[in-house]
Image (cartoon, rainbow, N blue to C red):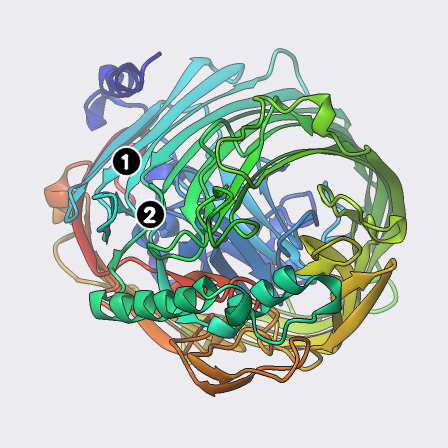
Amino acid sequence: MSTRSLKLALCATACMFAAPAGAADTGSQTQSGASPFAQNGAVETVIVTARRRSEDVQKVPAEVTAISGADLRVADVKSAIDLQNFAPSLTVSASLGSRDTDVFSIRGQSQPFGGADPGVQTYFAEVPFGASGPGSEYDMANVQVLNGPQGTLFGRSTTGGAVLFEPNKPTDEYGGYVDGQLGDYDLNELQAAVNIPIVSDKLDIRFAGDFERRDGFTQDLSTGQNLDNVDYDAFRASAIMRPFVHFENYVVFDWLHDETNGTGAVLTGVNIATIDNLAAEALAGEDFGDPNPCDADPAICQFEQEMLYALKQQQGLGPRVTTSSIAPGFDRDTWKVVDQASYDITDDLHIRNIFGFLSDKQRPSFDVDGSFLPLLDISNSRTWESNSLQVTEEFQVLGETPDKSINWIVGFYHELDHPGGYSEVERSVLGGPQPLNSPFFGFGSTEFESLGNGGISDAAYGSATYDASSWVRGLSFTAGGRFTWDHKVATASVCPLYLEGTTCPFPLTSAYALPTESANFSAPSWTLSTNYQVTDDTMLYATYRRGYKSGGFNSGSAGLPTQLEEFKPEFLTDLEIGIKNNWSILGVPGRTNLDGYYGWYDDVQKNDTVGILGGEAPQFDALTFNAARATIKGVEFQSTIVPNDNFEMSLLYSYTDATYSKFELPEFIEGGTPVNLENLAGDPFSDTPQNKLGLQPRFHIPIDASLGMPYLSAAVYWQSTEWFTDLSQQETTCAAFIRPPYVSGPYTCLATAGQQPKQGPYTTANFRFDWENFMGEPVDASAFVDNAFNKTYQVGANPYLHLLGTNASIYAPPRMWGVELRYRFGADGQSSE
């Protein structure tokens, strides 16, 4: 089915079933039509599934943030990056080369570049998936952010946390909505959903879709493209079946196609000593005998001046214009199926089965250095860069004792990951292969690398909570444990080209294959916690947890010593103490949650490009090492106050102290031994601002209720400095330097050139006006402005000053405005008063 046909079918379905509001059956309003405003001047109860069962968030002994579907809409959340404004300690950054592949970080736990697993795992309907870019946040019941190690109950054990995307499920009430947005940059978005009960209490279905187009805000002078545009189509279908009593089966199909002009990477920093060093090493070989590469190859010095010119030119153009050496782009096709089956054996004993299937293909093309110079380009001209399949199966048994004093869960999780087809990465350095008489022959190259990563992960887990109120009223204890067995397999084929006119076969044949790597990793993880419900509204808790992240391989590195072909698992053990309180002062209700934590982070997996000595010239490869140790500590605060029916205010703050106490990475591997160890202890964590502050006021404009409910809302966000690399000591700029008397000596930098890969403190503000039930009709009218003060700030970077000599920045969108109109029908069309 074409995209146009899919849109028309969805809208036709929604409109065909759209009866007048008065003709619909009455009933409670579904999530999609719910107002985000607190009702009757009260702080509403928030239900979450952080412990794999539905419960009040105020009863969970850990920091959890739940953002309702209504709040997601009012906040105009269109991508994962927008979520960081609403959860303490959560940071979402643009990944290498693309704002459509996001990096989630919680309490300093992130995604190191390379073959390591993520420190924060995202889930869709309780199944792991990669939440990247736009197209995942529509028609949501809620998004839950779980802070801290998730080492017991969730599919994958992680060290940092989890983000749960829970879509709206079908209900037994007919209803839905059609929603359209128009705005500057030629914004056009159509979103719709319809809920249809087929057989009352037996079969309910729901269809939803989101289709958005928006022009880019970065102009590429080299290609004529408008980069950073939006162009995606997303569709979802779900059903709940209850063929017999006590049994329910929920199935959801989700599809996304995302195809854009790519991300505008802007050159913002240069270190000319880096490329001079690389040239000297390549020209001199292992003995580093030539003290000055300019003498051996004067083109190197000329290239240094070209780098400085490119930076000066870019500084004149500003952050909304760039000059790429290739045409950027991004394609993604992904679809998944989730099936959740549950059966109530008795009132106190239940079984659940959760099956997931995911197919994901991505093809980014980007200019790593962000300039017209052909330093490093990832063009991926032949096929997908990644093509993966994932199958998960999870079985649970849940129960409680007849006296309700103990509730428990045991389960088994199985995951199979393998390639969904051929994929490869295409990298070109210094313009690609060169003719023999070129001054850059031996430097310029193109490499095709096909990586096939897969494996099996199995885990058995259990958890039980004991209500010790017979000892002390309100006291309870929870103990949970898990053991994970990971078997990982990695295949790699590599074809490098240095001479102009040579080619690599497509696909790469077995002649280019490296030996297959496989290994087993296993470890226990646990959660121990105690709750003390001091009063019905106040809970104290303490939680002690251990999270585990599997090891992996340095795939695609030919000639690497055996002992360095794989890296080991990493672990985070933390202690969290907190208080959750619903309160009322002089009749004004509110909610305040406060926690402090301390984590011990061991065998930390870190990645860098390292030279492997042993041939005529060093071979440089990106390798991951268990290179660091750290402690992480912080404080998190959330509060909501509702003074009256017309006003509410939410506030969040987090402080994260995350620096490395030990951090050593080698510059070279010689004879199988890491040498020239660089001491990076004291470096701050990447993607982890030390301070975050968010403020969300909402004011209801009191008018006659028969005319609807207009209100104003804002989202103000501030954060302190954020680095986009763990290697802050290495990532320095340099425009002029003194050459050493011998090549292996350090260069002395005399002048800076641009900026390092970090973003200083900044504040943003989004404003929105909504009029629900406009003039008494089931219509919601809205107007919004995002980044209202047009703040220019970075959301990611390609931090390669120490490897490539460049830093390229990825910037947040400029100020954007729009209007929105939503028509609700059926149960969704009923007044929310």
Number of the label disc, if any, that sits on residue 73 = 2
Task: Identify the secondary structure beneath mark 2.
Answer: helix
Residue 347 versus residue 600 in the image, above or below: above
Which residue is at a point 61% across and 21% down the rendered structure image? 421
Q: Please indicate whether residue 719 sits to the left or right of residue 193 in the image.
A: right
The reply, left or right, for residue 680 in relation to residue 505 is: right
State the image quarter where residue 594 is shown: bottom right
- Say which residue label 1 marks: 212
Residue 227 picture location, percent across and down: 28, 47
Three-letter code, disc 1? Glu
Which corner quadrant of the image does residue 743 belong to?
Answer: bottom right
Q: Callout 1 environment at 10 Å: few (<14), some (14 to 19), or many (20+)?
A: many
| Front disc: 2 or 1 | 1
Q: Let me know if residue 644 appears in the view.
A: no
Residue at mark 2 to residue at mark 1: CA–CA distance: 15 Å
Q: Is residue 751 above or below residue 539?
A: below
Residue 61, numbered label: none
313 shown above or below 32: below
Residue beneath the point at 63% across and 44% down: 54
Name the amino acid type tagged 2: Arg
Pick the front one: 592 or 65: 65
Q: In front here: 598 or 101?
A: 101
The structure residue drawn at horizontal position 69% and vertical position 48%, both measured from the top left corner, is 117
Residue 323: x and y in percent read 28, 54
Q: Is residue 322 left or right of residue 538?
A: left
Residue 205 placement: quadrant: top left
Front residue of 632 and 176: 632
Residue 107 seen in this snapshot: yes
Where is residue 280 drawn, in percent x and y?
Answer: 60, 67
